[in-house]
Amino acid sequence: MGRKSSPFKLGDYVRFKERQKDEESGIDIGGWQGRITKIDAEQGMLLVALDSITLKGLPREYLEESEEEGLDWSEYCIELNSVESVQPRDTKRDVEKIVDELSDSLDWAFLGEEGREINAILAEAESEYAQMEAWEAHLQKVLKFPFDAEISEWQKPGSILQVGQGVRVTGIDDLDEFYGILVKVKKGRKAYIFPLCDLEVIPKSSPNHDPVQLYAVWFANR
């Protein structure tokens, strides 16, 4: 029995035939275009690097779910008989540019719903310090001071405040390159400055709990 062959070669540009849907997400993939990067003639499959125009039109939900599942949204594996030859409509440089832009906007999508919330908060922030400023602005809006919290992270031996101790958070004090957002806390009659990332709001039913927890997740993964 002879070896199967493909009517296409590496580097050819193809268009996905109409009335096709992605099996996992159910989205319409008819009309997608891209460049062939791998051919499995034996299995009748192609790996297609999507072009910049297709990438720009990908649904946000599809991009985020792909990131969450660790899948590469810039390529698509499709049956050989489900595509047709076309002329390229962009360049590899165009593709690289849009892939970089989309990747930047999806930085935290791997965290699922939490990641989507983080991306929304940091949408306009590029540098890490700008991201901290975005967090400060967001938390100033959503947190209600004062509130109770518990120290949730290990502290250096000899530190006055230690894991498990309760404090009263009275407001945001400053931003620090290494410790992130610093807050003003009180324990008894004494006041301190403490990293917000090392605190957990109590009780968990407090409306302040989830915003602070989300910030702590970002800080730990940044």
Image (cartoon, rainbow, N blue to C red):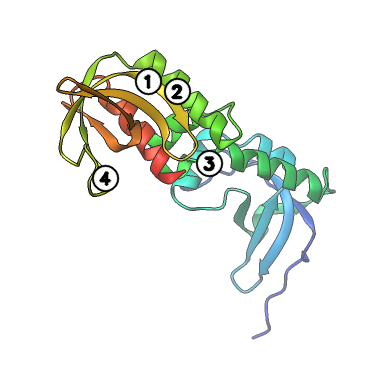
Residue type, mark 3 in image: Asp
| CA–CA distance in space, label 4 to label 2 | 23 Å
Q: What residue does disc 4 label?
A: 155
Give 79 or 120, whichever is nearer the viewer: 120
Give 81 or 168, whichever is nearer the viewer: 168
Give 107 or 129, whichever is nearer the viewer: 129
Left or right of 53? Residue 73 is left
Q: What residue does disc 3 label?
A: 107
| CA–CA distance in space, label 2 to label 1 | 8 Å
Q: What residue does disc 1 label?
A: 172
Residue 183 image position (x, y, % from top left): 34, 25
Residue type, mark 1 in image: Ile
Query: Residue at point 38% right, 35% down?
Result: 114
Query: Residue at point 45% right, 32% down?
Result: 118
Figure quadrant of the N terminus: bottom right
Dot placed on the residue nearer the N-terminal end, 4 or 2: 2
From this view, report whether residue 2 is shown above or below residue 102. below
Q: Which mark is residue 136?
A: 2
Q: Residues within 10 Å of mark 4 (few under 14, many from 20)?
A: few
Residue 31 visible (yes or no): no
| CA–CA distance in space, label 4 to label 1 | 20 Å
